Amino acid sequence: MEARLRPHHILCAQNFVGYGYNEEFTGRMNRITESLMAGGEIILHEGCDDICSACPNNKEGRCISLDKVDRMDREVLKVCDFSYGDRLDPEKARSYAKEKIFETEDFSRICGGCQWYEICRKIRIKVSRIEKYENIMHKAEMMLEGSMDYDAEVLREMVSELAAYYESAEWKEDFADDEAGRLPKGIKRGVLSEDGIYDLLERYRDFCNKYKAD
Ligand code: SF4
């Protein structure tokens, strides 16, 4: 299912973890984020969109914070080089939001005046951390299975980093947030599965033993 979204709602959709103005609004956000996860296309829309239509701040088709949200919309279009009417696949929207806004100073500049900014800022810190370890785990798995060039020292460092994360308070916090549905749905989170890192550490141990025996 496609979704008509005003440009700054591309950002809101990435960080949605259940907060909203009321039940109808959060229900709508849930349906839209699920449809994006299923690959539903985004059409960049000017003015009140499929999210606004369930929002109490939408008064007769006009946002009561129009100046603020209009500025945010224009900034997102400019930074991402998008135009109204563009059709985006959700993966492109995700990567543009991440690389051009969330991981740059434009994040606070564009979203700093929004009442949800502090929640989104904390979510992005967690998402970056989880993505970092997810990436390390993926590379370590590829080295262990032989589908990526293997460097003993690099692999050892990656496994050490994963082991330290697995034993840290941060992993416990990320795990608890995941269990409680406080992380955005779209992110990969193999590092937070009960056995994800544990199994990799076991495989690494077996790999080292075999390497020594050979
Ligand atoms: S606050 Fe304004 S821009 Fe945001 S969802 Fe509500 S109507 Fe739309």
Image (cartoon, rainbow, N blue to C red):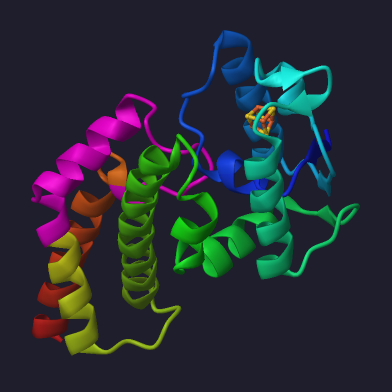
Q: Nearer the viewer, residue 132 or 23?
A: 23
Q: Is residue 213 left or right of residue 197?
A: left
In the rendering, at what x and y percent does residue 49 appear? 80, 32
Q: Which residues are magenta?
A: 164-191
In the rendering, at what x and y percent does residue 53 appear? 77, 21
Residue 176 lies in the magenta-colored region: yes
Residue at image position (75%, 43%) is 6
Q: Is residue 162 visible?
A: yes
Residue at image position (22%, 73%) is 158
Residue 17 lies in the magenta-colored region: no
Quarter of the N terminus within the rendering: top right
Q: Which residue ends up furthest to the front in the rendered image?
A: 67
Quarter of the C terminus within the rendering: bottom left
Asked if residue 212 is positioned above or below residue 182 in the image, the reply reads below
Q: Is residue 113 left or right of residue 210?
A: right
Residue at image position (46%, 69%) is 104
| Quadrant of the image occupied by residue 123 | top left
Q: Which residue ends up furthest to the right in the rendered image?
A: 85
| Quadrant of the image occupied by residue 204 | bottom left
In the rendering, at what x and y percent does residue 195 appear? 25, 43
Q: Nearer the viewer, residue 91 or 149?
A: 91
Q: Nearer the viewer, residue 137 or 11?
A: 11
In the rendering, at what x and y percent does residue 199 appear? 23, 52
| Ligand 1's quadrant | top right
Residue at image position (74%, 61%) is 77
